[in-house]
Amino acid sequence: MKRLNTEGQAPATLIIACCDSRVETGLLMQAQPGELFTVRNVANLVPPYEPDEELHGTSAAIEYAVRDLQVDHIIVLGHAQCGGIRAMITKAMGKEIERDFIGPWVSLAHRATELYVNGPDGYREPISLELLEQHPSLVERAAISGSLNNLLTYPWIKSEVDAGRLALHGWWFDIESGDLWTAQYPEVYLRRVPDDAEAPTD
């Protein structure tokens, strides 16, 4: 901490995680103070690039991490049993969410309920909202891919990714089993890290 106090921070990784108290990013990544620049919000969502006079807390943190701290990696970390994603599925089904801010916020991930899930997961037809309500992990993972795509709408992120100076990653953590699913842009689907694999270090 003395060194961080005198030299300042220089984290290599920005991690965009959920507010859920069960997902402790530092513990999950075995990180020391100063190694992670962490942004937490409901459902670990990244809004698209929309500069205006509105309030953009998540976008401001992303901008600082990329343009000022010059991080090398951005990880969008989702997880199982996400209350924000469940709220979004509820909203997509036409049910009211009796909260002032949560409904509009989680609607950022609404497209995740409209995706065709095919190939790796075996689905080749549109999945009903009723089925997604029973299997929210499909939406949780799709929302991570959506946030990775939204990151690329930020011109100063896109230019760094294209130049090979910045890598984008999607992670999904299964709270019950402890499994970690990962994908690195431009991959679309998250895959479980094998039990005998080394822990991700990016």
Image (cartoon, rainbow, N blue to C red):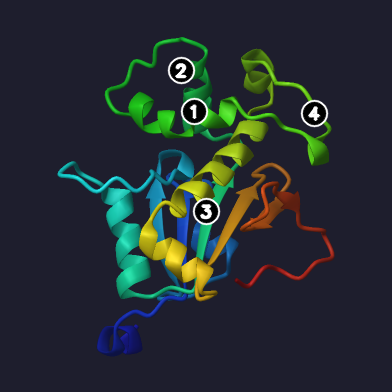
Residue 189 or 197: which is nearer the viewer? 189
Report x, y in % for residue 6: 26, 89
Which of disc 3 and disc 1 is earlier in sequence?
A: 3
Circle 3: element type: strand
Q: Residue at x 65, y 13 (%)?
A: 130
**Image mark for residue 76:** 3
Comparing 67 with 160, the one in front is 160
Using the numbered discs, state the Cα–Cα distance from disc 3 to disc 4 in whole angstroms. 24 Å
What's the CA distance linking mark 2 and mark 4?
23 Å
- The residues bearing labels 1 and 2 have C-alpha atoms spaced at a distance of 9 Å
Q: Is residue 15 visible?
A: yes
**Circle 3: is it few (<14), some (14-19), or many (20+) Cα within 10 Å?**
many
Q: CA distance from mark 4 to mark 1?
A: 19 Å
The residue at 43%/73% (across/down) is 71
Q: Going from the N terminus, do you reach mark 4 or mark 1 first?
A: 1
> Which mark is on residue 123?
4
How packed is label 1: few (under 14 Cα within 10 Å), some, or many (20 or more)? Answer: some
Quarter of the figure with the N terminus: bottom left
Q: Residue reaching furthest left?
A: 53
| Amino acid under disc 2 | Lys
Q: Quick one: label 3 or label 4, which is nearer the N terminus?
A: 3
Identity, as a three-letter code, of the amino acid under mark 4? Tyr
Type of amino acid at the residue the image marks with label 3: Val
Q: Are marks 1 and 2 in contact (CB under 8 Å)?
A: yes
**Which mark's residue is nearer the viewer, 1 or 3?**
1
Of residues 81 and 50, the one drawn nearer to the viewer in this rendering: 50
Residue 103 left/right relative to 72: left
Q: Residue at x 37, y 68 (%)?
A: 66
Q: Earlier in the sequence, mark 2 or mark 4?
A: 2
Residue 162 point in image, percent of width and height: 52, 68
Residue corresponding to mark 1: 110
The residue identified by callout 2 is: 91
